[in-house]
Image (tube, rainbow, N blue to C red):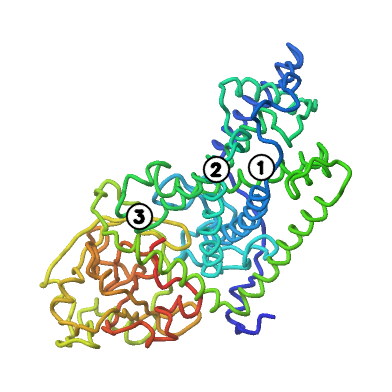
């Protein structure tokens, strides 16, 4: 099946190290224990000391006046469409997480500062350890598309699915309030909280409460749970996802602080996913335990019939269809990856170019915010040309600038330094998930563009590296002329007020702050001005875009 990949690629996609590991900080375990004690422990204490509380369901009428009766077709369709897209989002999200299987509450992402990790690997102190080396394998039965370092394809599935998930949710909420179905989910009395606790005590102590007929209304705990899924989980998932966007973070620096910081948003995003998974498991278990046939008829055909299994047949068919699509998605990922890349660019690429890509970065961070650790990515160049330049401290380095410009030039580091110096403290957003704050000093690209005078037809700048891509060949990436003209877009020769190190891109590395890190070419050798990105490499805008199906526009 995987004939598109050569042997070197196969070893990266399917490594021998498939160990599964979960590492969690002891302080987090203490917090979890306290939460468990404050809920299940308290419920058992109440039961053992005071007995079971009264079951609120006993006081509910079979059908409340003006209460919703049954499940209309639009609600059933929305429910199953939501299920389909949510499964895709969760599976692709797990593949994205596997590319940097560490979660933090700090922006620096230093090794051993994570609160949760899904890797047995410790970052070594005696050698350069890149973030790509840290990526983990995930089974394609769990992740979409699975395997190792398939984050480009995983992001396509994730971001292709999210707009439809949100549209379905918006339609559901609109119809919910245009009808009386909102009364199922939205509590109208504070009494729902003590009633929910009473129901929880029954469940926690293994006493099944009286189950009201869900065709007419839910018990208090069900109502709060469904309300949280619709009006809490989904919005928090959306907002925490937005807070990880480099374009949004660099424009609205306060936004990620809603979750503590950028890595806090990533951790919250994961916790919301985990909450969805737990909810699905409990939800399905309770459907089966409280009358599978009747409950499935409720949500599939909108009838209150405990004897006809038609709802089970339809529901099972939808679940099988979702599973079958998972196999189809796997096939598309590895046999038609370029089509997937095109589809995501058509929808989200256009959307981002008309919205968040227009945002201008704003200064925010101070010297005290600089991260003590900054992950390394990419292999240091090993070409004779670069090694000879490095041996002479890049004194003989010349940046070649050509293409569709009036004034082709070659500039040494000293030439560049004499032109201008702009120093910015910014956050680096890696596509893999880690971040780091650093100072970058260098020449504003706007000054360089002014010097070389590009022709009116120019839309694209190509930045070539001395280094190679993951699968060989010269690394390069492209940026729109408008992004290169944005504030804080520079060619940096300085990092944290020191000369740029070899591991971080000496002699020059690119900084375009509204983009993800893979767009910021290290070890820059030359720049070319073109009228389109389609005439370079394979025509998709960069080495990672060509070989690993990354996005041309990397605002999020």
Q: Secondary structure at mark 1?
A: helix
Q: Position of residue 158 (x, y in %)?
A: 54, 61
- Residue 407 visible from this viewpoint: yes
Distance in Å between CA atoms under marks 1 and 3: 30 Å
Front-lying residue, 36 or 531: 531
Q: Give the left or right position of residue 295, taking residue 464 as reference.
A: right
- Where's the C terminus, which quadrant? bottom left
Residue 208 quadrant: top right
Q: Secondary structure at mark 3?
A: helix
Q: Which residue is mark 3?
A: 248
Mark before the other along the chain sequence, 1 or 2: 2
For residue 233, the mark is: 2
Local packing at callout 1 (Cα closer than 10 Å; few below 14, some 14-19, many 20+) is some
Residue 550 position (above or below residue 37): below
Q: Position of residue 414 (x, y in %)?
A: 14, 75
Front-lying residue, 129 or 264: 264
Q: Which residue is mark 1?
A: 279
Front-lying residue, 338 or 19: 338
């Amino acid at each position: 099946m995987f004939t598109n990949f050569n042997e070197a690629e196969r070893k990266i996609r399917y490594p021998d190290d498939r160990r599964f590991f979960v590492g969690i900080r002891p302080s987090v375990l203490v917090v979890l224990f306290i939460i468990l004690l404050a809920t299940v422990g308290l419920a058992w204490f109440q039961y053992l000391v005071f007995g079971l509380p009264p079951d609120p369901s006993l006081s509910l009428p079979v059908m409340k006046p003006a209460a919703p009766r049954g499940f209309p077709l639009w609600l059933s369709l929305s429910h199953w469409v939501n299920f389909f897209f949510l499964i895709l989002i969760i599976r692709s999200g797990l593949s994205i997480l596997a590319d940097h299987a560490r979660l933090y509450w700090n922006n620096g992402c230093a090794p051993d500062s994570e609160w949760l990790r899904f890797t047995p690997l410790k970052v070594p102190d005696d050698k350069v350890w890149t973030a790509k080396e840290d990526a983990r394998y995930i089974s394609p039965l769990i992740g979409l598309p699975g395997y190792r370092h398939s984050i480009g394809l995983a992001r396509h599935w994730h971001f292709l699915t999210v707009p439809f998930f949100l549209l379905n949710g918006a339609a559901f909420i609109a119809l919910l309030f245009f009808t009386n179905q909102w009364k199922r989910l939205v509590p109208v009395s504070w009494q729902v909280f003590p009633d929910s606790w009473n129901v929880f005590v029954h469940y926690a102590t293994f006493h099944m409460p009286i189950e009201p007929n869900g065709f007419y209304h839910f018990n208090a705990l069900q109502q709060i749970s469904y309300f949280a899924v619709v009006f809490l989980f989904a919005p928090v998932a959306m907002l925490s996802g937005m807070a990880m966007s480099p374009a949004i973070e660099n424009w609205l620096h306060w936004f990620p602080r809603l979750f503590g910081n950028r890595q806090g948003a990533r951790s919250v995003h994961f916790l919301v996913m985990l909450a969805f998974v737990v909810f699905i498991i409990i939800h399905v278990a309770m459907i089966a335990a409280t009358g599978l046939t009747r409950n499935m008829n409720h949500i599939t055909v909108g009838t209150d019939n405990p004897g006809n299994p038609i709802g089970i047949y339809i529901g099972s068919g939808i679940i099988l269809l979702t599973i079958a699509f998972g196999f189809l998605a796997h096939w598309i990922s590895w046999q038609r990856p370029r089509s997937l890349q095109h589809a995501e660019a058509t929808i989200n690429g256009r959307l981002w170019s008309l919205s968040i890509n227009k945002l201008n970065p704003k200064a925010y961070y101070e010297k005290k915010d600089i991260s003590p650790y900054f992950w390394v990515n990419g292999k240091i160049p090993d070409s004779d040309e670069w090694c000879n330049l490095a041996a002479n401290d890049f004194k003989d380095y010349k940046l070649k600038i050509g293409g569709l410009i009036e004034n082709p030039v070659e500039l040494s580091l000293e030439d560049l330094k004499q032109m201008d110096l702009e120093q910015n403290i910014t956050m680096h957003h890696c596509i893999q998930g880690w971040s780091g704050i650093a100072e970058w000093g260098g020449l504003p690209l706007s000054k360089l563009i002014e010097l070389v005078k590009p022709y009116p037809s120019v839309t694209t700048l190509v930045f070539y590296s001395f280094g190679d891509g993951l699968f060989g060949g010269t690394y390069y990436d492209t940026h729109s002329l408008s992004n290169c003209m944005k504030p804080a877009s520079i060619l940096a020769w300085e990092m944290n007020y020191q000369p740029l190190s070899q591991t971080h891109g000496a002699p020059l590395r690119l900084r375009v702050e509204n983009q993800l890190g893979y767009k910021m070419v290290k070890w820059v050798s030359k720049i070319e001005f073109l009228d389109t990105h389609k005439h370079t490499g394979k025509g998709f805008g960069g080495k990672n875009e060509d070989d690993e199906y990354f996005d041309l526009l990397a605002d999020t």
